Image: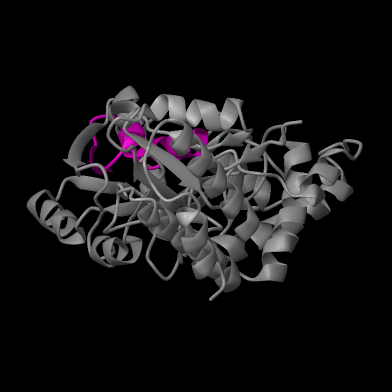
Amino acid sequence: MKKNYLLTPGPTPLPPLVLEAMAKPIIHHRTPQFQAIIKEVSEGLKYVFQTKGDVYMLASSGTGAMEAAIINILSPQDTVLIVQAGKFGERWTEICNAYSIKSEVLNVEWGKAVDPEVINRKLKGDPKIKAVFTTLCETSTGVATDIKAIGAIVKNTDAVLVVDAISGLGAIDLKTDEWNVDICVSGSQKGLMLPPGLGFITVSEKAWKKNAESKCPKYYFDLKKAKKSLACVDTPFTPAITLIIALAEVLKMIKQEGLENIFSRHKRLADATRSAAKALGLELFAPTAASDVVTAVKVPVGIDGEKLVKAMRDTYGVTIAGGQSEMKGKIFRFAHMGYMNEFDIITGISCLEKVLAQMGYKFTLGSGVKAAEEVLLK
């Protein structure tokens, strides 16, 4: 018998309460019963995003929320600054290109975090820049970005700060209002412990002013519609009813544990994972800017990275993620986010050790598990 463990940076494991909520009979969305749920989740999302502003829900993946962020504040031929430090930074550029928006790309070496001072110099050098796009956690590399420092810079300019928090929200700290994030986007299938299908977006007053000038075409993702509907405790189009009902359960779980405790739990699991990797003689891909969401590890010389991930998944039922794009086969990514605890990490490391040993990698068997347990016992 093979039992499956999901240790990928999205989708992530689902709590039993979420599965139970999604198994309930569906209800109609234009009813007082569903309005009560919308009101409940709207308040809960403000807690998670750490904002006093409204959080709009879209029946889409996080990429839909990214597209909504762009087309609601910009016009064709506008100039923006995009931090590209991995695959998902590139996505900002790809969406901007689709709408004929001029992207000034700030390329950052994969595995490194952007230096906020570089953004400062770029903004001072080009007053035409209307928005700065970056990521809270670059999932493809396991890198965390200093959003607080970037926000402190962008707030003093005419530009708005737009942050992709799809893999970081609900796992690592993000103070939307306090850190001057003008638009924050996220998705349901990562730290929020839901299946894919919900996108989330916040909009500051500064960003709403940009919205008034925006000439990008939009219909489904027109946030004016979302704002008008939410004021009436409604949605402009058919919402993802079942996911929103399950979201209500997730938000109760998050409030019960508390954000600070959640951030501490993720850090503890991340520290255990990184200690295990080092004990196995493996090299971290992002040692100076490692995220507590996902740990990226270099595949050792002589080991086939794609076969490593495949064997863990297909033979033993432990699914981790491989590298993307230029890092394919060169790194593997071990997530520790959402509905996970220390025994998920121990199981994953134990499986990693077994497969590495079978592939001929030389190390002391059990050293990774031991190192992780020493962190978790503290």
Quick check: 357 left or right of 197? left
- In the displayed structure, 52 sits above or below 339; it is below
- Taking depth in this image into account, of 24 and 241 the one nearest to the observer is 24
Please, which colouring scheme is shown? one colour
Residue that appears at 14% across and 55% down: 118
- In the displayed structure, 305 sits above or below 127; it is above
Residue that appears at 36% across and 45% down: 297
Instruction: Give how far across and how far down residue 240 sits, in percent.
Output: 72, 36
- Taking depth in this image into account, of 323 and 260 the one nearest to the observer is 323
- Taking depth in this image into account, of 334 and 73 the one nearest to the observer is 334
Instruction: Give how far across and how far down residue 366 sits, in percent.
Output: 50, 53
From where the camera sits, is residue 224 visible?
A: yes
- In the displayed structure, 74 sits above or below 288; it is above
Q: Indicate the quadrant where residue 52 lies.
A: bottom right
Q: Indicate the quadrant where residue 4 lies.
A: top right
- Residues in magenta, as a range: 63-92
Instruction: Give how far across and how far down residue 15 sits, in percent.
Output: 74, 49
Is residue 57 inside the magenta stretch?
no
Quick check: 179 left or right of 44? left
Q: Residue furthest right?
A: 25
Q: How many marks?
A: 0
Quick check: 239 left or right of 203? right
- In the displayed structure, 223 sits above or below 264; it is above
Q: Quadrant of the N terminus?
A: top right
Q: Residue furthest bottom?
A: 378
Quick check: 79 left or right of 58? left
From where the camera sits, is residue 203 visible?
A: no
Instruction: Give how far across and how far down residue 77 sits, in percent.
Output: 23, 30
Residue that appears at 16% across and 45% down: 128
- Taking depth in this image into account, of 262 and 281 the one nearest to the observer is 281
Is residue 64 inside the magenta stretch?
yes
